[in-house]
Image: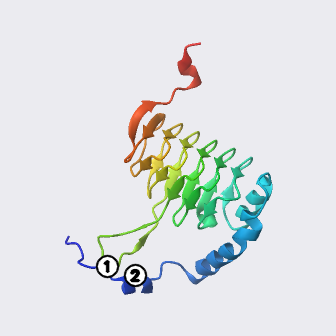
């Protein structure tokens, strides 16, 4: 397959990436996100869970989403019980993002479930899903790319860039992220 010489921006802009209903819902979310979500005091976790559910997100119990979190498409978001999404995190949920039970997404982390096919001249939008399994920790300012699956109890180190699946129970760091250790369970301490 040969690569295109030039991206055809006009063809890309003419392409239908969203249904009319989705466009209206996205406009409503952008219009109401600030007053109903972003401007709320930090301790109003329950209110923000309610707002996200009203926009189609599947949100578990005792979930903490900070008011400064940026969520692109809430109905593509699932956050299971007792998970937390920290200050300034970006959940670019053009495709689905599934955050498992007890996951921590730290401040300014970026989960990006959207990209473009650079091999095609019309540069079509892609929406590969992201899955972060139970007990994982996405540390501060880490980037998790489209289509990535992060295994249970894994730690993605601060500012790591993850563009490939990460197995369960490991610690990764760097750009691109590579395994630098294993996460110990409470049973591994030998007490």
CB under 8 Å between discs 1 and 2: yes
Percent across and percent down for residue 169 are: 48, 34
Tell us which disc is closer to us: 1 or 2.
Answer: 1
- The residue depicted at 65 percent of the width and 74 percent of the height is 30
* Mark 1 closeness class: few <14, some 14–19, many ≥20 residues within 10 Å: some
Percent across and percent down for residue 61 are: 74, 48
* Mark 2 closeness class: few <14, some 14–19, many ≥20 residues within 10 Å: some
Residue at the extreme top of the image, as rendered: 191
- The residue depicted at 60 percent of the width and 67 percent of the height is 73
- The residue depicted at 71 percent of the width and 58 percent of the height is 67
Residue on which disc 2 sits: 12
Element at badge 1? loop
Above or below, 119 relative to 161: below
Percent across and percent down for residue 152 are: 52, 39
> Relative to 5, is 88 on the left or the right?
right
Residue on which disc 1 sits: 7
Q: Which of these two is toward me, 108 or 3?
A: 108
Residue at the extreme left of the image, as rendered: 2
Element at badge 2? helix
> Relative to 14, is 133 on the left or the right?
right
Q: Which of these two is toward me, 68 or 53?
A: 68
């Amino acid at each position: 397959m040969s690569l295109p010489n030039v991206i055809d921006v006009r063809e890309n802009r003419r392409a239908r990436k969203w249904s009319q209903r989705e466009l209206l819902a996205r406009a409503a979310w952008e219009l109401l996100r600030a007053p109903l979500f972003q401007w709320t005091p930090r301790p109003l976790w329950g209110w923000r869970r309610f707002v996200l559910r009203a926009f189609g997100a599947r949100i578990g119990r005792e979930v903490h989403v900070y008011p400064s979190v940026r969520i692109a498409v809430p109905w593509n978001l699932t956050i299971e019980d007792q998970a937390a999404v920290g200050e300034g995190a970006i959940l670019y949920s053009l495709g689905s993002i599934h955050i498992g039970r007890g996951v921590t997404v730290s401040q300014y982390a970026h989960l990006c479930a959207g990209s473009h096919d650079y091999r095609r001249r019309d540069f079509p939008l892609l929406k590969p899903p992201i899955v972060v399994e139970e007990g994982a920790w996405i540390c501060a300012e880490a980037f998790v790319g489209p289509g990535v699956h992060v295994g249970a109890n894994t730690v993605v180190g601060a500012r790591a860039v993850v563009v490939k699946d990460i197995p369960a129970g490991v610690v990764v760091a760097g750009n691109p992220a590579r395994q630098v250790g294993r996460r110990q369970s409470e049973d591994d301490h030998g007490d």
